[in-house]
Amino acid sequence: MSLKVIAIISVLVILVIEQSVSGFTLDPARSGRKCKCLKETRSFISPDQYEKVEIFAPASNCPKAEILITLKTGGMVCLDIDAKWVKRLIEALIAKKDKVKSQKTTKASIKKN
C-alpha cells in the first residue's frame, strides 16, 4: 500500500471513531440539512469540558429539540434529550436562568426605590 492510501484510511478511521464516540454535527447552512444533529450521544460529558451549551427548540426548520455542547477542545457534541443526565442538565440550566432573572428583577426594584 502506498503512503497516500494509508493516510486516507487513517483519516477515515479517525472520523468513524469520532462519530461513534460523540454526536456528529453538521452546519445546516453548509449541508442543506435542517437539523444540526445527525446523531446524539447518551454518554455523560463532564461539565468541566463545556465551553458552551446551546438548546434549540423545535421549529419549522427542525421538528425536534436539540442540545449542542461546544467543548473546550473545540469539538461539538449533540446530546440525546431523553438521557437521564441530560434531563438533569436541562433542569439545572433552567433553574440557573430563573435565578439570574430573579436577581435582575430584584436589582431593578431596588434601583426604583
Image: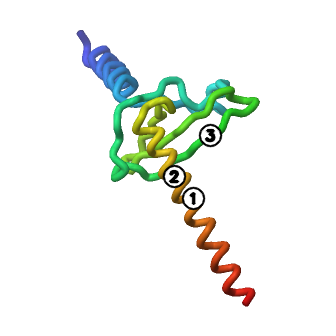
Name the residue: 74% across, 86% down. 112
**Residue 58 locus on image (x, y percent):** 68, 33
Can you tell which of label 1 and label 3 is closer to the viewer? 1
Q: Residue at x 23, y 9 (%)?
A: 1
The residue identified by callout 1 is: 97
Task: Name the residue beneath numbered marker 3.
Answer: 56
Among numbered discs 1 and 3, the one appearing first in the sequence: 3
What residue appears at the point 25 percent right and 13 percent down from the top-left corner?
A: 2
Residue 93 - label: 2
Marks 1,2: beta carbons within 8 A: yes
Decide: is 56 above or below 92.
above
Instruction: Indicate the position of residue 69 as horizontal and vertical percent values.
Output: 47, 43
Label 2 or label 3, whichever comes before in sequence order: 3
Q: Note whether 17 is above or below 71 in the view shown.
A: above
Q: Nearer the viewer, mark 2 or mark 3?
A: 2
Secondary element under disc 3, as helix, strand or loop, is strand
Residue that lies at the very extreme toward the bottom in this rendered image: 113
Classify mark 1: residues with Cα within 10 Å, few (<14), some (14-19) or many (20+).
few
Residue 13's disc number:
none
**Identity, as a three-letter code, of the amino acid under mark 3:** Phe
Q: Where 29 falls versus 33 (above or below)?
A: below
From the top left corner, tell me how far across and down residue 46 is, in percent: 33, 46
Q: Nearer the viewer, residue 60 or 97?
A: 97
Of residue 16 and residue 71, the one placed in the foreground of this image is 71
Question: In the image, 35: left or right of 53?
Answer: right
Q: Alpha carbon of mark 1 to alpha carbon of mark 2: how far?
A: 6 Å
Q: CA distance from mark 2 to mark 3?
A: 13 Å
* Element type where label 2 sits in the image: helix
Question: Looking at the rendering, in which quadrant would you find the C terminus?
Answer: bottom right
